[in-house]
Protein backbone atom coordinates (compact mmCIF):
# COMPACT_ATOMS: atom_id res chain seq x y z
CA UNK A 1 0.00 0.00 0.00
CA UNK A 2 1.42 3.35 -1.02
CA UNK A 3 2.05 5.90 1.73
CA UNK A 4 -0.16 8.98 1.90
CA UNK A 5 2.28 11.08 3.91
CA UNK A 6 2.33 14.83 3.31
CA UNK A 7 4.90 17.58 4.01
CA UNK A 8 4.91 18.92 7.57
CA UNK A 9 5.79 22.45 8.69
CA UNK A 10 7.98 22.39 11.81
CA UNK A 11 8.48 25.05 14.49
CA UNK A 12 11.85 26.13 15.85
CA UNK A 13 13.76 23.45 17.77
CA UNK A 14 16.66 25.07 19.62
CA UNK A 15 18.34 22.84 22.21
CA UNK A 16 20.75 24.61 24.59
CA UNK A 17 24.30 25.20 23.39
CA UNK A 18 27.53 26.47 24.95
CA UNK A 19 28.00 29.51 22.71
CA UNK A 20 26.14 32.73 21.94
CA UNK A 21 23.90 33.39 18.95
CA UNK A 22 20.36 33.08 17.70
CA UNK A 23 19.39 36.60 16.69
CA UNK A 24 19.66 35.80 12.98
CA UNK A 25 17.48 32.71 13.45
CA UNK A 26 14.85 34.78 15.26
CA UNK A 27 14.93 37.38 12.47
CA UNK A 28 14.57 34.76 9.73
CA UNK A 29 11.64 33.12 11.48
CA UNK A 30 10.02 36.46 12.38
CA UNK A 31 9.97 35.42 16.03
CA UNK A 32 8.56 37.80 18.64
CA UNK A 33 10.32 38.67 21.85
CA UNK A 34 13.95 39.20 22.79
CA UNK A 35 16.06 37.48 20.11
CA UNK A 36 18.78 36.83 22.70
CA UNK A 37 16.42 34.26 24.24
CA UNK A 38 16.81 32.06 21.16
CA UNK A 39 19.59 29.51 20.92
CA UNK A 40 22.30 29.64 18.25
CA UNK A 41 21.24 26.34 16.64
CA UNK A 42 17.83 25.31 15.29
CA UNK A 43 17.75 21.56 14.59
CA UNK A 44 15.33 21.08 11.69
CA UNK A 45 13.54 17.74 11.18
CA UNK A 46 15.96 16.20 13.66
CA UNK A 47 16.01 12.50 14.48
CA UNK A 48 19.30 13.11 16.33
CA UNK A 49 19.70 13.96 20.01
CA UNK A 50 22.47 15.91 21.69
CA UNK A 51 25.41 13.74 22.71
CA UNK A 52 24.44 11.81 25.83
CA UNK A 53 21.24 13.79 26.42
CA UNK A 54 18.28 11.50 25.66
CA UNK A 55 15.61 13.27 23.63
CA UNK A 56 17.12 16.79 23.66
CA UNK A 57 17.46 17.95 20.06
CA UNK A 58 14.76 15.70 18.59
CA UNK A 59 12.01 17.27 16.46
CA UNK A 60 8.40 16.73 17.46
CA UNK A 61 5.59 16.43 14.90
CA UNK A 62 2.30 18.34 15.32
CA UNK A 63 0.57 15.12 16.46
CA UNK A 64 2.96 14.87 19.40
CA UNK A 65 5.21 12.08 18.13
CA UNK A 66 8.94 12.41 17.81
CA UNK A 67 9.86 12.51 14.13
CA UNK A 68 12.42 9.80 14.94
CA UNK A 69 9.66 7.45 16.08
CA UNK A 70 7.45 8.23 13.09
CA UNK A 71 10.29 7.39 10.69
CA UNK A 72 11.05 4.16 12.55
CA UNK A 73 7.39 3.15 12.32
CA UNK A 74 7.19 3.75 8.54
CA UNK A 75 10.71 3.94 7.09
CA UNK A 76 9.66 3.23 3.51
CA UNK A 77 6.95 5.89 3.65
CA UNK A 78 9.25 8.56 5.02
CA UNK A 79 12.46 7.59 3.24
CA UNK A 80 11.64 5.39 0.25
CA UNK A 81 12.46 1.71 0.02
CA UNK A 82 15.97 2.09 -1.42
CA UNK A 83 17.07 4.67 1.13
CA UNK A 84 15.51 2.76 4.05
CA UNK A 85 17.39 -0.39 3.03
CA UNK A 86 20.69 1.41 2.51
CA UNK A 87 20.65 3.29 5.82
CA UNK A 88 18.82 0.87 8.14
CA UNK A 89 15.83 3.18 8.40
CA UNK A 90 17.80 6.31 9.32
CA UNK A 91 17.19 9.64 7.59
CA UNK A 92 21.02 9.84 7.26
CA UNK A 93 20.71 13.63 7.59
CA UNK A 94 20.57 16.40 10.15
CA UNK A 95 19.89 19.99 9.08
CA UNK A 96 20.54 23.00 11.30
CA UNK A 97 20.23 26.73 11.18
CA UNK A 98 23.41 27.91 12.92
CA UNK A 99 23.99 31.54 13.92
CA UNK A 100 27.45 32.09 15.35
CA UNK A 101 27.12 35.01 17.78
CA UNK A 102 30.75 34.39 18.69
CA UNK A 103 33.59 32.44 17.11
CA UNK A 104 33.20 28.72 17.64
CA UNK A 105 36.15 26.74 19.04
CA UNK A 106 38.61 24.81 16.91
CA UNK A 107 37.20 21.30 16.63
CA UNK A 108 36.78 18.32 14.29
CA UNK A 109 34.52 15.31 13.78
CA UNK A 110 35.11 11.56 13.47
CA UNK A 111 34.85 9.48 10.33
CA UNK A 112 32.35 6.66 9.93
CA UNK A 113 35.05 4.11 10.69
CA UNK A 114 36.21 5.91 13.86
CA UNK A 115 32.60 6.34 15.02
CA UNK A 116 31.94 2.62 14.54
CA UNK A 117 34.96 1.72 16.66
CA UNK A 118 34.50 4.22 19.46
CA UNK A 119 30.84 5.30 19.51
CA UNK A 120 29.05 2.21 18.16
CA UNK A 121 27.54 4.40 15.44
CA UNK A 122 26.95 3.79 11.74
CA UNK A 123 27.66 7.48 11.12
CA UNK A 124 30.55 9.82 11.76
CA UNK A 125 30.06 13.49 11.09
CA UNK A 126 30.86 15.04 7.75
CA UNK A 127 29.14 18.42 7.40
CA UNK A 128 28.66 21.35 5.04
CA UNK A 129 27.81 25.02 5.51
CA UNK A 130 25.61 27.12 3.25
CA UNK A 131 26.20 30.75 4.19
CA UNK A 132 22.85 32.58 4.19
CA UNK A 133 23.83 35.71 6.13
CA UNK A 134 26.77 37.54 7.65
CA UNK A 135 27.32 40.32 10.16
CA UNK A 136 30.37 42.34 11.08
CA UNK A 137 33.18 43.79 9.01
CA UNK A 138 35.09 40.63 8.15
CA UNK A 139 33.05 37.41 8.46
CA UNK A 140 35.22 34.31 8.13
CA UNK A 141 35.37 30.59 8.61
CA UNK A 142 38.47 28.54 9.38
CA UNK A 143 39.20 25.14 7.84
CA UNK A 144 42.16 22.78 7.48
CA UNK A 145 45.73 23.23 8.67
CA UNK A 146 47.81 25.57 6.49
CA UNK A 147 50.75 23.21 6.92
CA UNK A 148 51.13 19.69 8.26
CA UNK A 149 51.61 19.28 12.01
CA UNK A 150 52.77 16.38 14.12
CA UNK A 151 50.46 14.86 16.71
CA UNK A 152 52.90 15.69 19.54
CA UNK A 153 52.79 19.37 18.59
CA UNK A 154 48.99 19.39 18.54
CA UNK A 155 48.86 17.55 21.87
CA UNK A 156 50.95 20.37 23.36
CA UNK A 157 48.53 23.00 21.99
CA UNK A 158 45.69 21.10 23.62
CA UNK A 159 47.53 20.62 26.92
CA UNK A 160 48.31 24.33 27.23
CA UNK A 161 45.07 25.44 25.53
CA UNK A 162 47.07 27.65 23.17
CA UNK A 163 44.06 29.11 21.35
CA UNK A 164 45.94 31.73 19.27
CA UNK A 165 48.27 29.10 17.84
CA UNK A 166 45.45 26.65 17.11
CA UNK A 167 43.40 29.25 15.26
CA UNK A 168 46.39 30.66 13.39
CA UNK A 169 47.29 27.16 12.18
CA UNK A 170 44.03 27.02 10.18
CA UNK A 171 43.22 28.55 6.81
CA UNK A 172 41.12 31.68 7.29
CA UNK A 173 38.46 32.03 4.59
CA UNK A 174 36.31 35.17 4.05
CA UNK A 175 32.68 34.30 3.31
CA UNK A 176 29.51 35.98 2.08
CA UNK A 177 25.96 34.77 1.42
CA UNK A 178 25.90 32.10 -1.27
CA UNK A 179 29.26 30.62 -0.33
CA UNK A 180 29.32 26.96 0.69
CA UNK A 181 32.01 24.96 2.47
CA UNK A 182 32.16 21.17 2.73
CA UNK A 183 33.89 19.91 5.89
CA UNK A 184 34.95 16.26 5.58
CA UNK A 185 35.37 14.16 8.70
CA UNK A 186 38.66 14.85 10.49
CA UNK A 187 39.17 18.36 9.10
CA UNK A 188 39.87 20.89 11.88
CA UNK A 189 37.60 23.92 11.60
CA UNK A 190 35.78 26.79 13.29
CA UNK A 191 32.98 29.16 12.26
CA UNK A 192 33.68 32.85 12.86
CA UNK A 193 31.47 35.34 14.63
CA UNK A 194 28.64 36.78 12.53
CA UNK A 195 28.33 33.84 10.13
CA UNK A 196 24.80 32.43 9.68
CA UNK A 197 24.53 29.10 7.88
CA UNK A 198 22.24 26.28 6.91
CA UNK A 199 24.30 23.28 7.98
CA UNK A 200 23.90 19.79 6.59
CA UNK A 201 25.57 16.93 8.42
CA UNK A 202 25.47 13.26 9.12
CA UNK A 203 22.97 12.54 11.92
CA UNK A 204 25.24 12.55 14.97
CA UNK A 205 26.47 14.99 17.62
CA UNK A 206 30.13 13.94 17.76
CA UNK A 207 32.36 17.01 18.13
CA UNK A 208 35.96 16.57 19.28
CA UNK A 209 37.06 19.97 20.55
CA UNK A 210 40.72 20.95 20.69
CA UNK A 211 40.04 24.43 22.07
CA UNK A 212 37.80 23.60 25.04
CA UNK A 213 38.84 26.25 27.59
CA UNK A 214 36.36 29.18 27.76
CA UNK A 215 33.90 27.10 25.73
CA UNK A 216 33.25 23.78 27.49
CA UNK A 217 33.04 22.76 31.14
CA UNK A 218 36.23 20.71 30.96
CA UNK A 219 38.50 18.58 28.76
CA UNK A 220 36.26 15.51 29.04
CA UNK A 221 33.65 17.39 27.01
CA UNK A 222 36.34 18.06 24.42
CA UNK A 223 37.37 14.44 23.86
CA UNK A 224 33.92 12.92 24.62
CA UNK A 225 35.40 10.58 27.18
CA UNK A 226 37.93 9.02 24.83
CA UNK A 227 41.01 10.90 26.00
CA UNK A 228 42.76 13.25 23.60
CA UNK A 229 45.37 10.64 22.64
CA UNK A 230 42.60 8.53 21.13
CA UNK A 231 40.52 11.43 19.84
CA UNK A 232 43.45 12.82 17.85
CA UNK A 233 43.58 9.61 15.83
CA UNK A 234 40.54 11.01 13.98
CA UNK A 235 42.19 14.38 13.20
CA UNK A 236 43.41 15.28 9.71
CA UNK A 237 46.85 16.73 10.44
CA UNK A 238 47.81 17.20 6.78
CA UNK A 239 48.35 20.48 4.93
CA UNK A 240 45.50 22.12 3.02
CA UNK A 241 46.95 24.64 0.59
CA UNK A 242 44.73 27.02 -1.39
CA UNK A 243 44.35 24.67 -4.35
CA UNK A 244 43.32 21.74 -2.15
CA UNK A 245 40.99 23.91 -0.05
CA UNK A 246 39.23 25.15 -3.19
CA UNK A 247 37.91 21.61 -3.74
CA UNK A 248 35.70 22.11 -0.66
CA UNK A 249 34.34 25.58 -1.44
CA UNK A 250 31.74 26.90 -3.88
CA UNK A 251 30.77 30.54 -4.47
CA UNK A 252 27.16 30.49 -5.69
CA UNK A 253 25.88 33.95 -4.76
CA UNK A 254 25.78 35.22 -8.34
CA UNK A 255 24.08 32.15 -9.84
CA UNK A 256 20.51 32.85 -10.97
CA UNK A 257 19.37 29.48 -12.31
CA UNK A 258 16.07 28.01 -11.17
CA UNK A 259 17.95 25.15 -9.47
CA UNK A 260 21.52 25.58 -8.21
CA UNK A 261 23.52 22.66 -6.80
CA UNK A 262 25.19 24.24 -3.79
CA UNK A 263 27.83 21.86 -2.50
CA UNK A 264 31.23 20.66 -3.69
CA UNK A 265 31.03 17.37 -5.53
CA UNK A 266 32.68 15.32 -2.78
CA UNK A 267 29.82 16.16 -0.40
CA UNK A 268 27.27 14.18 -2.41
CA UNK A 269 28.31 10.89 -0.79
CA UNK A 270 26.84 12.28 2.47
CA UNK A 271 24.16 14.83 1.54
CA UNK A 272 22.80 17.07 -1.21
CA UNK A 273 21.60 20.68 -1.24
CA UNK A 274 19.95 22.80 -3.91
CA UNK A 275 18.79 26.38 -4.05
CA UNK A 276 15.36 26.66 -5.67
CA UNK A 277 14.05 29.86 -7.25
CA UNK A 278 10.94 28.84 -9.21
CA UNK A 279 9.96 30.56 -12.40
CA UNK A 280 6.39 29.38 -12.50
CA UNK A 281 5.91 25.91 -11.05
CA UNK A 282 9.04 23.85 -10.35
CA UNK A 283 8.61 20.06 -10.21
CA UNK A 284 10.59 18.06 -7.66
CA UNK A 285 11.17 14.31 -7.66
CA UNK A 286 10.02 12.12 -4.74
CA UNK A 287 12.56 12.31 -1.93
CA UNK A 288 12.91 12.72 1.79
CA UNK A 289 13.88 16.39 2.09
CA UNK A 290 14.14 19.33 4.45
CA UNK A 291 13.10 22.72 3.09
CA UNK A 292 14.25 26.07 4.46
CA UNK A 293 12.52 29.14 2.99
CA UNK A 294 14.95 32.06 2.89
CA UNK A 295 12.94 34.70 1.03
CA UNK A 296 9.50 35.43 -0.38
CA UNK A 297 6.35 33.34 -0.34
CA UNK A 298 4.68 30.63 -2.38
CA UNK A 299 3.11 27.20 -2.15
CA UNK A 300 4.20 23.55 -2.08
CA UNK A 301 1.81 21.09 -3.76
CA UNK A 302 1.88 17.30 -3.74
CA UNK A 303 0.66 14.85 -6.37
CA UNK A 304 -2.35 13.85 -4.26
CA UNK A 305 -3.62 17.40 -3.98
CA UNK A 306 -1.92 18.44 -0.76
CA UNK A 307 -1.05 22.11 -0.41
CA UNK A 308 1.29 23.87 2.01
CA UNK A 309 1.73 27.65 2.10
CA UNK A 310 5.36 28.78 2.22
CA UNK A 311 6.83 31.99 3.63
CA UNK A 312 10.21 33.34 4.71
CA UNK A 313 11.50 31.48 7.75
CA UNK A 314 9.40 28.35 7.27
CA UNK A 315 11.04 24.95 7.69
CA UNK A 316 9.40 21.75 6.45
CA UNK A 317 10.09 18.04 6.32
CA UNK A 318 8.95 16.34 3.11
CA UNK A 319 8.47 12.54 3.22
CA UNK A 320 9.37 10.42 0.21
CA UNK A 321 5.77 9.15 0.36
CA UNK A 322 4.46 12.59 -0.60
CA UNK A 323 5.49 11.64 -4.15
CA UNK A 324 6.26 14.27 -6.76
CA UNK A 325 5.96 17.78 -5.39
CA UNK A 326 5.81 21.21 -6.96
CA UNK A 327 6.97 24.53 -5.55
CA UNK A 328 5.61 27.77 -6.95
CA UNK A 329 5.95 31.44 -6.08
CA UNK A 330 8.40 34.30 -5.74
CA UNK A 331 10.68 32.72 -3.21
CA UNK A 332 14.09 31.22 -2.47
CA UNK A 333 14.22 27.78 -0.87
CA UNK A 334 17.11 25.58 0.24
CA UNK A 335 16.28 21.91 -0.34
CA UNK A 336 18.42 19.57 1.76
CA UNK A 337 18.54 15.82 1.08
CA UNK A 338 20.50 12.73 2.07
CA UNK A 339 22.69 11.04 -0.55
CA UNK A 340 20.93 9.53 -3.54
CA UNK A 341 20.27 5.81 -3.02
CA UNK A 342 23.21 3.85 -4.35
CA UNK A 343 25.54 6.87 -4.10
CA UNK A 344 26.29 6.60 -0.39
CA UNK A 345 29.91 5.93 0.49
CA UNK A 346 31.71 5.74 3.76
CA UNK A 347 35.14 7.26 4.27
CA UNK A 348 36.68 4.11 5.71
Image (cartoon, rainbow, N blue to C red):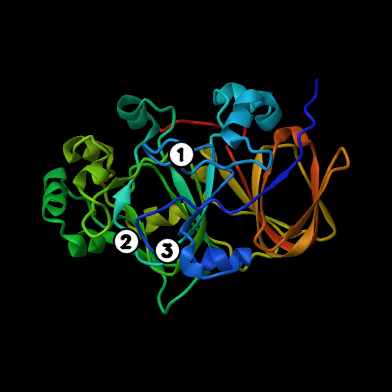
Q: Is residue 156 left or right of residue 42?
A: left
Which is more toward the observer, 169 or 59?
59
Sequence-earlier tag: 3 or 2: 3
Q: Which residue is mark 2?
A: 171
Of labels 3 and 1, the one closer to you: 1
Q: Secondary structure at mark 1?
A: loop
Find residue 340 and report its horizontal and vertical position in percent. Answer: 62, 35
**Residue at horizontal 39 percent and vertical 55 percent from the top:** 245
CA gap between label 1 and label 2 equals 31 Å
Q: Secondary structure at mark 3?
A: loop
Of labels 1 and 2, the one closer to you: 1
- Look at the picture and state if 73 lies above or below 154: above
Find residue 309 and report its horizontal and vertical position in percent. Answer: 79, 55
Q: Which residue is mark 1?
A: 49
Q: Is residue 276 left or right of residue 132?
A: right
Q: Which residue is mark 3?
A: 100
Sequence-earlier tag: 3 or 1: 1
**Residue at horizontal 75 percent and vertical 32 percent from the top:** 321
**Residue at horizontal 18 percent and vertical 62 percent from the top:** 165
Sequence-earlier tag: 1 or 2: 1
User: Which part of the image, by quadrant, shows the C terminus?
Assistant: top left
Which is more toward the observer, 7 or 303?
7
Find residue 224 and report its horizontal and vertical position in percent. Answer: 27, 39
Q: Secondary structure at mark 2?
A: strand
**Residue at horizontal 76 percent and vertical 39 percent from the top:** 6
Find residue 141 and report its horizontal and vertical position in percent. Answer: 39, 63
- Look at the picture and state if 124 lies above or below 85: below
User: Which part of the image, by quadrant, shows the N terminus?
Assistant: top right
Mark 3 Cα shell of 10 Å, populated few (<14), some (14-19), many (≥20): many
Amino acid sequence: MRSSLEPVALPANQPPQFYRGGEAIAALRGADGDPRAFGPEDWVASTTSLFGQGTAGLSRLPDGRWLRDAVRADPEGWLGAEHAAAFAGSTALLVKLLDAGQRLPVHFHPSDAFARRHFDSHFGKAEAWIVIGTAGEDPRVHAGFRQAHGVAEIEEWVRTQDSPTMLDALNSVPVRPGDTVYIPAGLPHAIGSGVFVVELQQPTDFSLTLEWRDFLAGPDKGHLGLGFATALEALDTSAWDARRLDTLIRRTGAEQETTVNLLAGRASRYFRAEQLRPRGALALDPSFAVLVVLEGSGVLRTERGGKQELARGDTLVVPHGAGETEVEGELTVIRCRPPAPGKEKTDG
